[in-house]
Amino acid sequence: MAAPASGAAREAITPDAPVKLSIRNVGKTYGGITALESASFDLRQGEFLTLLGPSGSGKTTLLMIVAGLVQPTRGEVWIDGKLATYTMPDKRDVGVVFQNYALFPHLTIRENIAFPLRMRRMPETRIAQEVARVLDIVQLPHVAARLPRELSGGQQQRIALARCMVYGPSIILMDEPLGALDRKLRDRMQLEIKELHARHAITVLYVTHDQEEAMAMSDRVCLMNQGQIEQIGTPRELYFKPSTPFVADFLGESNMLDGTLEKAGDVALMRGPHGLAVRARTHQVIAPGDAVKAVVRPESVRLLREGETADNEAAGDVTEAVFVGGVSRIFITLTQGVVISAKQLTDAAVPQPRPGERVRIGWNIDHGVVLKASEPAR
Amino acid sequence: MSMAMVEASAPPLSQAGWIRAWPIYPLLLFVLAFFVYPVAQILWLSLIDPDGHFTLANYVHAATTPVYLQTLGITFQIAVWTTLLAILAGYPVAYLLATSRVRTREALTLLVLMPFWTSFLVRTFAWMILLGRNGVVNHLLVSLGIVDAPLSLIFNFTGVMIGMVHSMMPLAVMAMLSVMERIDGNLVKAARTLGARGGNAFWRIYFRLSMPGIAAAGLLVFITALGFFIVPSLLGGRQQTMISQVIISVVQELLNWRFAGALSVMLLAASALVFYLYDRLLGMSTLSGSADDVADGRKSGVLARAGSAAGERLIAALGWMTDRAGALLETVMPPRADRPRRAWSRLVLGIVAGLIIAFLCLPSLFVIPVSFTDGSFIEFPPKGFSLRWYETYFTSPGWVAATTRSFVVALLTGFVATVLGTAAAIVLVRQRIMFRMAIITLVLAPLVLPRIIIAVALFYLYAQLNLVGTVAGLVIGHTILAVPYVVITVMAVLKTYDERLDHAAWTLGASKWQALRRITLPQIKGGLIAGFLFAFITSFDDLTIALFVTGGSTSTLPRQMWNDLLLQVNPTLAAVSTLILVFVTAFIVLAEILRRRAVAG
């Protein structure tokens, strides 16, 4: 669905695309409470970066610091090559789409969009042209004379975006812009924003707590937790190569097995509870004897048929099998006492395993990741 | 409120509905008998001569005697200035409150409302202590060498303005605050990120959206100010005589009901005219305080649309001017990208609003030191220390009787108003009854109608019913004044009450009465306490009704103070004022604690 758009955008982001935003060791403390520990990353021209995390993870604080609406306690913010850590919000080259859109209720749509241009003392004739231009872009030329509350949620959303695009800021910041919309509309708006981003090569810093939204829209995702960046990378990297148990747990579903590392290397061997051996990839430097966690996605766990084999194999009893439509979910209690969840496409021709049934399960080396168990030092 | 609207919103008539709405009838009958009937009677009286014939003589007399027209002019003039100053000084305070954290806001709100709770007479008396020729202010100015001779701050326009603005500003602040609280804080932030400097963001967005609050504050303050008589009587001179004072003297000295009625009609007509103009100019919807409604030009009045273009231009100009000033300041202190910004504007706001809040809550406190004087006159600093004036108070049969009477009347008023008001509020919130808006308007009318008219009307009625000088007469009059507060508070609490709790109680076997007593009432206790408190204070503080209905041995505390204030200002008044201050503060703190506990529980 979003593939062509993100493909087009990715072309624009080459390592030599200019850095539009640079965050360096930025932190924020309110009184004695740390809202943001220390964040650093670069955002390149045309990139779509999402700050993802549970509430209270510091993502909105970081966004507000970039917007200039919150002053950081430490660190530096560079926008378009200029130091802007404490620059006034009106003097930095950013646009913000607020969670509730923050359209001015007393101004018509035309005046809302004209507002940033008036503040820049643009001549009246150009203002009219520019407003018409962005209204065309968001495909709402007919609402110019209306007031914001006469528009639907989706329309207001598009106008908020148009109001930012009209003055061509270096970066557009979006704070959970789709949070107030219902599921269906949200999906559509995701595509629309994605397309606008690709076609107009806008640089976007996006905040959401919805992981699917983050995955679907972003070139890169910055996963945050308790005021810290857990991992930053492409959606695939985060999903398949999580660097901490938090990342693995937060994104999608996962089976997490505790154990100690027996053999290090590209393919690590982990000894789990009651001697359960797990072989999986590792991207970290871990020494044998360290406490580790092995992560396996439920969709990677297969029920092995007679004669079928896998890199990792285990046997157990089906505890529960749940049919939820297109997929079925099966919980298996291994002989080692661990419960593993498996997810498979439902096949009408194949009967679902029944509780109590003895089964063999397996998954391949490439489908598992071994991680250091301890949280990285704070 | 137009009749068309009322009828359009009225649900279909049903027989059962009329019966089910019975709890509202006691209040309705009460208001009809002791408010609508007497006021109508006094207005009617102004149109007939003693022989029962229709006559306009009273109006001709009022219109052709320069002194009455002058008084009306002065009344308007004072009300206009009071309104302007109260809004001007109240705006920064309301803005500070609206943009503070919840905790700070709650604390500051209590301070702002101080003058509202403090007895009218106490605070006016405090201003007499402060502003007099040898008062605190002059004492300070002269001893600091700022002025050579004492300034005339009292018994003139200045004194009236200080007293009136002090009284009215809490009302203005609360009216503006209720609108400001609903302005989305993100809007100003959005304006800033869109390139607006502080000035443009404030004027074009925040100020523009707070205008309905200003308009509502203006109307409330103006209408209330029109009916004032305590402040101009005590702090003003002959040149500041307001129409209510004239009405009082016409009744008390000339006993000319018909003419007093005519003057009341003129005052009423003036109020109505203001309401009408307000509706035409801005639309009544602004009173409900919704920023959205006013933002919509199509809904508001004719003139509002015509004036709006000019208004928007003015606001834009103010925005650019403020920003120009800000830019000028920045050439002196250039902002740096590598240093945190200082919130200068916030600091200035804090100082300005802080001073205004001090103006609101400090003056009353000056009655305390004065009450402990050993001298025989009100003076500051007080001479020596003694409790003799407290002794005078406690040993004076007149004062003690007046105090007792005030307590009895206030308690009874609180009780009657709470019972009648709560019953009516429950019906008004929960049942779909005919003419709901009309009934609410009727019940709330005593709030906006100048009190003096109600007082004169009740005096005339009581004279026929032999209620003058009785506790019953006072309680009835005070209940009319107090019941709107009860209805408003209880309705507000009930609107947030989840009715399904009652439904649950019914399904669990409770009768309607049991559900009301065991489920509903305990949960809305906070509202009931607040309503009772309002009613108690309204009665305890009332002078207007007491002015006519009591006298001599039947005086209430305010009435007794009023007599002393007019005839012989003495330190006993300071002692009484201090006691009232302490009592009312304790009462409010207690009620606040009870209310919080009720809300928390």
Image (cartoon, rainbow, N blue to C red):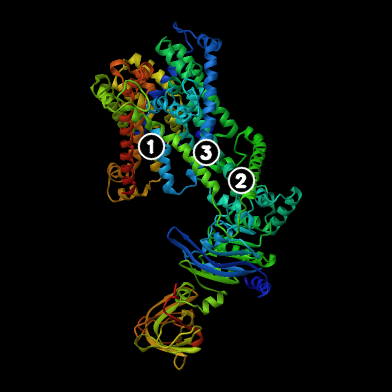
Is A123 rendered above or below residue A302? above
x and y, in percent, of residue B519 in the image: 30, 46
Q: In the image, what residue occupies the spot 58% across and 49% down?
A: A149
Which of the two labelled residues, at mark 2 and mark 1, occupies the earlier sequence position? 2
Q: CA distance from mark 3 to mark 2?
A: 16 Å
Which residue is denoted by mark 1 in the rendering?
B425
x and y, in percent, of residue A357 in the image: 37, 84
Chain letter, disc 3 residue: B
Q: In the image, what residue occupies the spot 50% across and 47% down?
A: B99
Which residue is denoted by mark 2 in the rendering?
B199
Q: Residues within 10 Å of mark 1 (few under 14, many from 20)?
A: many
Chain letter, disc 1 residue: B
Secondary structure of the residue carrying numbered label 2 = helix
**Residue B514 lies in what quarter of the image?**
top left
- Which mark is on residue B91? 3
Is B110 rendered above or below residue A325? above
